[in-house]
Image (cartoon, coloured by chain):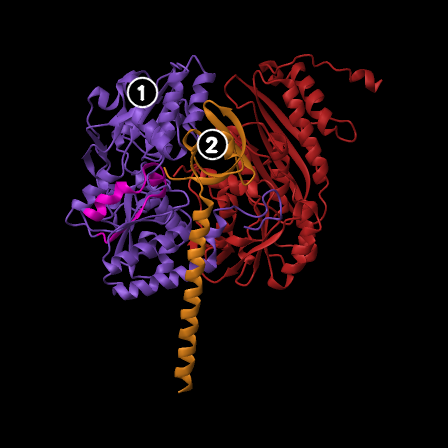
Chain colours: A purple, B red, C orange
Amino acid sequence: MNERGEGGGRGMRFADEFRDPARARALVAAIRAVLKEIGATAADPVHVMEICGGHTHAIFRYGIDRMLGDGIEFLHGPGCPVCVLPMSRVDDCLEIAEREEVIFASFGDAMRVPGTRGSLADAKARGADVRMVYSPLDALELARRNPDREVVFFGLGFETTMPSTALTVLQAARERLGNFSLFCNHILVPPPIRALLRDPDMRIDGFIGPGHVSMVTGIHIYDFIAEEFGRPVTVSGFEPIDLMQSVLMVLEDIRDATPRIRNQYARVVPEHGNKAALAAIDRVFTPRDAFDWRGLGEIDRSGVKIRPEFARWDAEEKFGVGYAAGKSSGREPEGCMCGEVVKGMMKPTECPMFGTICTPENPMGALMVSSEGACAAYHLYAGLRPEEVAS
Amino acid sequence: MKDMERLPRLRARHVTLAHGGGGRAMRDLVEEVFLEAFGRPGDGSLEDQARLELPPGRTAFTTDSFVVSPLFFPGGDIGALAVNGTVNDLAVGGARPLWLSAAFIIEEGTAIDLLRRVAASMAREARKAGVTIVTGDTKVVGRGQADGVFVTTAGIGVIPPGRNLAAENVRPGDVVLVNGRLGDHGATILNARGDLALETPIESDCRPLNRLMEAVLAAAPSCRAARDATRGGIAAALNEIAEAAGVRIEIDEAALPLRSEIRGFCEILGLDPLYLANEGVLVTFVAPEEAEAALAAMRALPEGQDAAVIGRVRQGRGVVLDTVLGGQRIVDMLVGDQLPRIC
Amino acid sequence: MCLGIPGRVVEITSEDPPAGIVDVSGVRRKVDLSCTVPAEGLAALMGKWVLVHVGFAMSVIDEDEAARTLAALEELGEAMEEIEAMHRSAAMLEEAE
């Protein structure tokens, strides 16, 4: 970016160096060389799954998939928490948000996901007090400033956001803030990956591991992928150079048949994770027996719920919604292929609704709403429309 | 005697429905808030219409409504937007803006001082732009039926003979220029409105662009087209031109002028500056041989000091971005509001 | 939710809960520091770079590791240049024949 020496005119540290075109060129050359050694071709490419939605977004935003050629195919994994949120949970959000006393605070991305009665944005248009926040702490502040209202924070995300949500609940408990609660939809990375690896139709040669999940958990949560399933994982940062370097590293392991867990993002990810973060998670959360995943169905012990000691801050208990109310999940609209795409079994362009019935203006499923969703990324960055895809 | 006739009669502190009723209360409001700021017609008359003599050339005519919330934000307010938005819509057609109308829909209960501030702001921007507000209207609606105040302005300008700016003129080989840094307004409004708790010196770039446009046209008479990049960011403006002209526009990511704070803001929230709204960004398309001159002309003015070449026009379709990395990606029109990403 | 961004700690505002102000390219935001309290105490975070995610500092960026990563990329860059140079000269030799 062209900055005229104004406040920070040197650019962004730990970002710009990892967007350098010269380094990118070197990596492209190295990757192509390894792909050749593997014998990968357009007809028989190497399949690498990037688990995390943020990685999907970065790949398309920088056009990395186009730069690497046909020998590698990226499978877009289920690591987009907005994308895998089942419709029933969105419906639960609306039920809570539509109560007059409630201020419903949510991350921006989650506001447009459609449930059976529309999205949170639709509810807001109909008069519900739904507010977009950047941090759960902002929701806590709303509770402090509005003592006569009930503030509910829509907590979702993988292990990355669990510590921040947990610490916020702990703070609410310390302040005895009775008008704040959390609607907990946090999920874990390993269970759906295990489910995918067990699926005989899946062909994944290696993984790009989620960088910010790993910052919290450390890298050994992926050991089972190498030990039980013989696939390599490289934990990656989010700048394009990070991703490309990680692709190179995982391809090397595929070439050498040395499945192991490697850490490209060592500047941020500690091998054993963050103690304080893990402690907070452990204090506040406990695994749920099962959680519903859009497209993947119910997966055992894949989600967390709030421990009984913090029930006062658990929106499910407070408002009698969700699993606390013993409800089962709703169904996706007819023809919705979000599930197949989220598993990497189908490309967005192969979904019959892509770009026709399901568009960013009128999304049918979460993958088109969330900017991490593969469908939204394809539509926005690759500009792929049904008529442009060779049939 | 004239002074005695103009002793202030408006004592109310807040607007009531009576102020929109057409009677004395309304006359007092109009005179002491709006005319006070905008000035009376030279001959002191107050007819139902403004009577104007159009200079030679083609008449340009535009209108826009302004509903921004919050009404006041760093770098501007609804009044400034209302004047500059309309002035700029005229300017990008090569017109010299002359006269504006200003219509107000005011919510019952709004503080009269607030209206004075808005009017003062409009008067100031009008002076800067060299236009006069010559006619207007006031209505009052019940509580909750407007967000404080809505403003609609319409503007008349004249396009001197011989000028013909149009998207269809844009052709392969042309150079794309902007006058300044992108995204300031959109980021300011998002920050002012949201519960984002970000401290930043970012301000809206709300300003008139007619002087700049005249400078560009003087230096680069072959200028094909211009756009005032507002909602939807420069992505929207570029896509409009690409579609209308049937060309492909290639933008160089490294060349986009951005405040480092806007970069930081976008990075934190996962926003793309291409889609952030602007209120003082002029996008111009000029013949390649005149690009240097146009650039120099812009940089000589304060509102053009950050002017830069950001891309080129080619054969083909759509708008693409050459990323800093060396890759390429498509820049499409955005759907709806850009939601801050968290992931 | 993966969007984490590097920022510099420019002020410590509270010990309990640990909190401070982080600067990202001129934009400042109050950030919770509970997950990055150093053994030497909170003050040791001043001037350090941290990874900020939804209002929480989640990791202190290890500048040595960053330098190592960049150095590895430099080496790769040089290696690729050499390989390219080799290819070019080989191609020239072929043409000459």
In the current view of this chain or complex, which residue is farthest to the front? Answer: C40
Residue at x 61%, y 28% (from the top left corner):
B103
Where does residue B322 sit, x and y in percent of width and height?
A: 47, 56
Q: Nearer the viewer, residue B146 or A209?
A: A209
1 and 2 marks in contact (CB < 8 Å) = no
Residue B151 location, quadrant: top right
Amino acid type at mark 2:
Glu
Q: Is residue A321 left or right of residue A122?
A: left
Chain letter for the residue marked with disc 1 in the picture: A
For residue A315, the mark is 1
Residue position marked by numbered label 2 in the rendering:
C40
Residue at x 52%, y 16% (from the top left corner):
B143
Chain letter for the residue marked with disc 2 in the picture: C
Residue at x 47%, y 58% (from the top left corner):
A21
In the current view of this chain or complex, which residue is farthest to the bottom? Answer: C97
Q: Nearer the viewer, residue A356 or B196?
A: B196
Q: Is residue B217 left or right of residue B260?
A: right
Q: Nearer the viewer, mark 1 or mark 2?
A: 2
In the current view of this chain or complex, which residue is farthest to the left? Answer: A200
Where does residue C70 sit, x and y in percent of width and height?
A: 45, 54
For residue B104, the mark is none
Q: Nearer the viewer, residue A247 or B99?
A: A247
Q: CA distance from mark 1 to mark 2?
A: 38 Å
In the current view of this chain or complex, which residue is farthest to the right? Answer: B1
Q: Which residues are magenta?
A: A204-227
Asked if the magenta segment contains residue A85, the reply would be no
SS for tag 1? helix
- On screen, A167 above or below B292? above
Asked if the magenta segment contains residue A207, the reply would be yes
Give the prevailing secondary structure in the magenta stretch. helix
